[in-house]
Amino acid sequence: MIEKGTILSLPTIGFVVGSLRKNSFNRSLAEKAQELLEGRANVTYIEFDGLPFVNQDEEFPTPAVVANVREQVGAVDALWVFTPQYNAQMPAQVKNFFDWLSRPTTPNGSMQETVVRGMPVTASGASGPAATAEARAAVNDLTAFIGMNVMTDGQAGFVLPGEAWAEGSWTVSDEDAKVLGAQVDAFLAFIGK
């Protein structure tokens, strides 16, 4: 485990926030994770909201927005997905994000040569009563299928309180922060393997 304050080259974790809403619940969760990672890892938010849907007719030459997302992802050591759950699934934009990353980067490239193959990944999420269980399972299945190194143990899902839905915002409780902190510790250890 990487202890807080240890002087090493810190890993860089790319945060993928699955909700595009500016003040989304899952962005709040990501911000709390970033706070918990302070001094132990660098965090960068992967911006992908402009990605077109995957279309082989448009795949090459690579659209600039796709190249930009691949470049962002290629610059990190691991990905952490913060996903909401829509109709018992991850949002379409999260699936599309990974669909693009699963594709070869050159017209004759191998499916083995992607920017995410072998990269560590984990998922968390905040939603209704299911606490994103189905969405996280879908993320895990997809990322394993495309060759990523998935940390499934210790993933944290959170049930949003009623007032969060009414107010449109959520502050992560101290109790939830402890659960998220355990995932932070587990993921840092997983990345370090």
Image: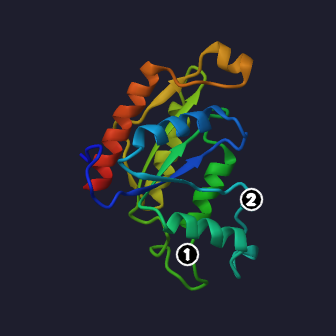
How many residues crowd around disc 1 within 10 Å: few (fewer than 14), some, or many (20 or more)?
some
Among the 4 quarters of the image, the one containing residue 88: top right
Q: Compared to 13, does 115 lie above or below?
A: below
**Label at residue 50:** 2
Residue drawn at x 37%, y 57% as measured from the top left = 11
SS at badge 1: loop
Residue most extreme to the top: 162
Q: Quadrant of the C terminus?
A: bottom left
* Amino acid at dot 1: Pro
Among the 4 quarters of the image, the one containing residue 129: top right
Q: Earlier in the sequence, mark 1 or mark 2?
A: 2
In the picture, measured across the screen, residue 167 lies left or right of residue 45, that is: right
Q: Are marks 1 and 2 in contact (CB under 8 Å)?
A: no
* Amino acid at dot 2: Gly
Q: Position of residue 5 (x, y in %)?
A: 29, 46
User: Which one is nearer the viewer's eye here, 32 or 150?
Assistant: 32
Disc 1: which residue? 104
Q: Compared to 134, does 2 lie above or below?
A: below
In the picture, measured across the screen, residue 92 lies left or right of residue 103, that is: right
User: Which one is nearer the viewer's eye here, 128 or 188?
Assistant: 188
Q: Compared to 119, does 171 lie above or below?
A: above
Q: Position of residue 150 (x, y in %)?
A: 39, 50
SS at badge 2: loop
How many residues crowd around disc 2 within 10 Å: few (fewer than 14), some, or many (20 or more)?
few
Using the numbered discs, state the Cα–Cα distance from disc 1 to disc 2 in whole angstroms: 20 Å
Q: Position of residue 31 (x, y in %)?
A: 54, 39
